[in-house]
Image (tube, rainbow, N blue to C red):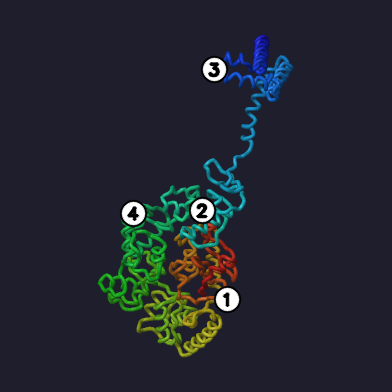
Amino acid sequence: MKEKLSSMCKTMRNKCSSCIAKIQNFFSKRKSGHYATTSKVKVSDRTTARRPLVHQVSNRHHSFSEWGPAHTVISMFRNLSNYYHSLGRHRLLYVLTACLLLIMTPFSIAFCIPFNSASAGTDVSLHINSSGVLSAAEVEASEPTKIYSAEPGFVNDVVIDIQERLMELSYMGEDEPSNYYGDETVEAIKRFQRTHGLEMTGVADYVTFDLLFSDEAKPYAVTKGAEGEDVLELQLRLVELGYLEEANGIFDDATTSAVELFQQRNALSVDGTIGQKTREALYSDDVNAYALYLGEESSEILSLQQRLSTLGYLTTTPDGKYGQDTVSAVKRFQERNGLISDGYLGNATKQLLLSDSAQANSISLGDSGNDVTRIQERLVALGYMRSATGYFGENTVSALKSFQKRNGLTADGKFGVSTNHKLFSDSAIKAASSSSSNTSNSSNNNSSSSSNNSSSSSSNNNSNYEYSGSGSVSALIKAAESRLGCKYVLGAKGPNQFDCSGLVYWCLNNAGVKQSYMTSSGWRNCSKYQRITSRSQVKAGDILVFTGHVGIAVSNSMMIDASTSNGKVVKRSSYGSYWDSRWICAYRIF
C-alpha cells in the first residue's frame, strides 16, 4: 500500500513539474514572423500587410514572460509546486483533505443555521414549519400584508387584524379582537374558506390570507352544498318557522327551496343563499313564518287553542279564530319551551305543543306582555291590584300570592294552570278591602321608586317597570358564572356552547326570567324592559347591548359574555376604547 501511494505521489509530482515547464515555455516563446509563418493562417498576397503588424508586436514585447500578470501566474504555479513537494510523503492525502473541507464547509454552515423566511419587502423573519405555515413562535408585530399565514395556537398582533377582517365580513361575531388564533378563529376561517371554494383547513395559509385581505373577499353566506354547525342552526330555525321539514346540517336542495320561499315571503332578495340580511330576518320579531297566524280560522286552530288552554297559556275561551289572544299565548308557550318567540304555529311549535314534553305555563317575575296585562286587569277587578302595567314585577307577585292564599291555592306568586283556572272563574274570591289598600300603597311607593331610578329610560316606558331584590340579580350572575369557559359556537344557545345572544338567553331563563332567544340586533330594539342609556347607571344584572354584541353586567365596569375572539365565555371589563365606541344601551331586567 505504501509503495502504491509513493508511486502515485511521484507520478503526480512529475506531471505537475511537466505542466509548469510547458506553461513556462509557452509564455517564453517569442511572437515573431516565424510564428506567423508556421501558424494556420494562410499568408498569401496579404503577407506584406501582416508582417509589419507582427513585427511591431515583436518589437513591443521582447518576451511575453516578462509581462507582469504572466510573470505572477508563473511564480504562483512554481510556489505551489515547491509547497507541494515540501509536504512530504503524505502530501496527496493532505491535498484531498483540504479539498473535502472546502467543499463541505458551506453545507455545514447552512445546516447549522435555522432556515428563516423573511416577509416580502421587510426585514421581519418568521419561523416556517415543515407544512409551509407559520408556527406559534414569538415574532415581532407586523402589518397584515407582511404575514403570509397563521395556524391554531399562533400568538401575534396580526391575529387581531385577521379577526377584525373576519368580523367585518360577518364570519365572526362582533367582539374585541385578540392576538390569539383560537378555536373560533379556526371555525371562522373554515367558513370563509367554504364560501370561497377553498379547502376547509381552518388555517390561514398563503392563499387564504391573501384572499381575506383582498377586494375579492366575499361576506359571510351559506349556499347549496355547505355543511357545518352554522348550517344546522339555520336549518333548525327554518324548521321552527315551518319552511323546512327536518335539519341535517347539509345545505341541500330542500334547504335551498325553503330559503327561497322564506325570502319571498319576507320581502328579501330571492337567491336561495343565507347571507347577513336573511339571517337577521330569520331571528327577527316580525318574521313571517310559513305557519298558522293572526286572522286565520279553522278546526285545527280550535284544537291547538284547547291545548294551549289546558296548559294554562290561553286565558280566553277557545273559538278557532287566530286572534291577538292566541298570538300572545303561542309566544308565551314558545318562550317557556325554549323556542323563538314569534307567535306563529309552525311545525316545530305544533309538534312540541301536542307532545307530552310540553311545559305548562307559569308566568312569573320578569315576564311581560298582553297576557300579563290580562292577569293584572283581572286582579284589579277582584281588588288585589290598583292598576295594570303589563310587567310581572314584585307588586304583581304580592297581589297574586294574596289571591292564591285567599282562594286556597299554593301561594307561590306564579301564574300556573290552577291559578289560571281559578282566577278567571266565576268562583274567584275577591280581595278584602285592607288588602286592596295595602297593595295600592305598595304600588304607589314602588312607582315613585321606579321613577327616581329610571331617569335614563324612554318616557313611554317609565311607569311599566318594577324591581325585584338582589336575589334575582344574584341568580342571574350565578348562572352566568357557572358558564365561564364554555365554548363559543355561532348560534348556540347552551347549555355547554353559546354565542353572545345564546348566553344571555340561557342565563335569563335559568334565573327565572322567561325570555326568548334574540340576536344582538333584536336586543337593540327591545321594548320589554327598562332601557338604560347612561353607562354610569349600569348595575349588576343589567343586559349590556353593544353594536353586534350583548353581555351580562356583573358590576358597573365588568361583564360576562360569550367572546368570539377568545372562543369561550369570559369575565372581563366592559370599558375600553373598543366597547366605548360600540356602546348602545343596557336593559334593566330586575
Q: Amino acid at mark 2?
A: Asp
Q: In the displayed structure, does residue 28 sit left or right of residue 391?
A: right
Badge 1 or badge 2: first in the primary sequence: 2
Mark 1 lies on a secondary structure that is: helix
Q: Along the line of sight, which residue is nearer the eye, 439 or 291?
A: 291
- Distance in Å between CA atoms under marks 4 and 3: 87 Å
Please report whichever mark, 4 or 2, sits nearer to the chain's N-terminal start.
Answer: 2
Give the farthest residue toward the left. Answer: 299
Q: Residues within 10 Å of mark 3 (few under 14, many from 20)?
A: few
Q: CA distance from mark 4 to mark 2?
A: 27 Å
Observer able to see residue 168: yes
Residue to which mark 2 is pinned:
183
The residue carrying mark 1 is 537
Task: Identify the mark at residue 41; answer none if there is no mark.
Answer: 3
Disc ID at residue 252: 4
In three-dimensional space, the C-alpha distance between marks 4 and 1, rounded to whole angstroms, equals: 49 Å
**Comes first in the chain, label 4 or label 3:** 3
Q: Is residue 156 left or right of residue 89?
A: left
Quadrant of the image containing the N terminus: top right
Q: Spatial distance from mark 3 to mark 1, Cα to Cα?
A: 108 Å
Q: Quadrant of residue 97?
A: top right
Please tell me how crowded label 2 is: few (under 14), some (14-19), or many (20+) other residues with Cα within 10 Å. many
